[in-house]
Image: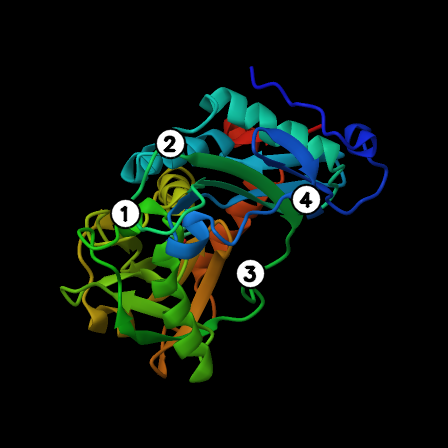
Amino acid sequence: MVEIKASPDPAANAIPKVKAPQYAYIGGKVVPLEEAKVSVLTHAFNYGTGIFEGIRGYYSAENHQLYIFRLRDHFERMEQNCKLLKIRLPHSIDDLCRLTVRLAEMNQLRENIYIRPLAYKSAQRIGVRMNEENDFTLFMVPFGDYLSTDRALRVCVSSWRRLQDNAIPARGKICGAYVNSALAVAEAQDNGFDEAILLNEDGHVAEGSAMNLILVKRGHLVVPPKSDNILDGITRDTLTQIARQELEVETEVRSIDRTELYSADELFLCGTGVQIAPVGFVDHRRIGQGTSGPITRQLMRIYDEILHGRLGKYSYWLTHVY
Ligand code: PMP
């Protein structure tokens, strides 16, 4: 079991009464958030050598409970990805889950939150070579919608290509890889779109800047294979499972051409941050009625029920904080 070491600041060891999150984990202990800092010399700060996760917690006022969604699955993915940078997580997956719950409890969060674990190369010296010095940090912030969910998005196909597996693996959730995402979303928004869809170097549809993409065609879902330079998303996995179990909608996994986006019946982006965001237009071409389609709406409704602990059948995906 991970031991939460006491901070030298006595105030930090008492459970705070205030609502704002105040504590983070870094260097093997819990510290006040404002003390969770890294040096400018840090390898990860200079070269992007970190692996992170994005996890959400949903507060149910009705049940006085904060539900963290698929916590263990996120840490399992993180552990896999850490191998890419030869980082060993400092604690077992069970202990990382317990640490997350404890930190949420200490922060007394009673609203929807976003949780960010980050394992990174912590050596403080110049030189890109990776060595054995690593650290792990965990923090959480209150978090609402990442993109508008009350209207369908206008997206474009980016002029930037998704990173190749043998350049910087997209499946890795590597900090530095998000420059690719930042370039794509910045370009899209500068051009008046909400989001970008990136193609891989083969010209096939990969994903959004920081989210997966699911297309609906003739009553079934179509998603790109994991080998098409995408992150193997936990939300996409969740949605394909509930589509089959709740709606009897099957998923076809195959490479998707750019022009199939234009002829989709429905299209949506999905991920922990974005949740489910219907797409109304791609490259100024209307998808379906330009609003969220019927399958998308049903998935949004069921997903929301699950996240807020209202669908008991899927309660094994939820970790309770209180
Ligand atoms: N692709 C990328 C590039 C992402 O950053 C994310 C967000 N983690 C996703 C897809 C969606 O993954 P998940 O559903 O596991 O959050």
Q: Name the disc covering residue 251, or none.
A: 1
**Dividing the picture into quarters, in which one does residue 211 lie?**
bottom left
* Separation (CA) of disc 4 from disc 1: 46 Å
- The residue positioned 37% from the left and 46% from the top of the image is 233
Disc 2 to disc 3, how far (Cα)? 25 Å
| Cβ of mark 4 under 8 A from ligand 1 | no
Residue type at the position of mark 3: Tyr
Q: Secondary structure at mark 1?
A: strand
Percent from the top left, x then y, of residue 13?
A: 78, 28
The earlier-in-sequence mark between 2 and 4 is 4
Amino acid type, residue under disc 4 in the picture: Glu
| Residue contact at pointers 3 and 1, CB within 8 angstroms | no
Marks 2 and 3 close (CB-CB < 8 Å): no
The coloring applied to the image is rainbow
Q: In front: mark 2 or mark 1?
A: 2
C-alpha span from label 3 to label 1: 26 Å
**Sequence-first disc among 2 and 3:** 2
In-front residue for pair 217/52: 52
Q: Which residue is mark 3?
A: 146
Residue pointed to by mark 4: 35
Q: Residue furthest front?
A: 125
**Mark 2 — residue?**
79
Quarter that holds the C terminus: top right
Instruction: Say which element carries label 3.
Output: loop
Q: Nearer the viewer, residue 220 or 240?
A: 240
Please tell me which residue lies in front, 105 or 153: 105
Q: In terms of depth relative to the viewer, which is nearer, 289 or 139?
A: 139
Left or right for 269, reference 112: left
Disc 1 under 8 Å from ligand 1? The reply is no
The local crowd at label 4, few if under 14, some if 14 to 19, many if 20 or more residues have their Cα within 10 Å, is: few
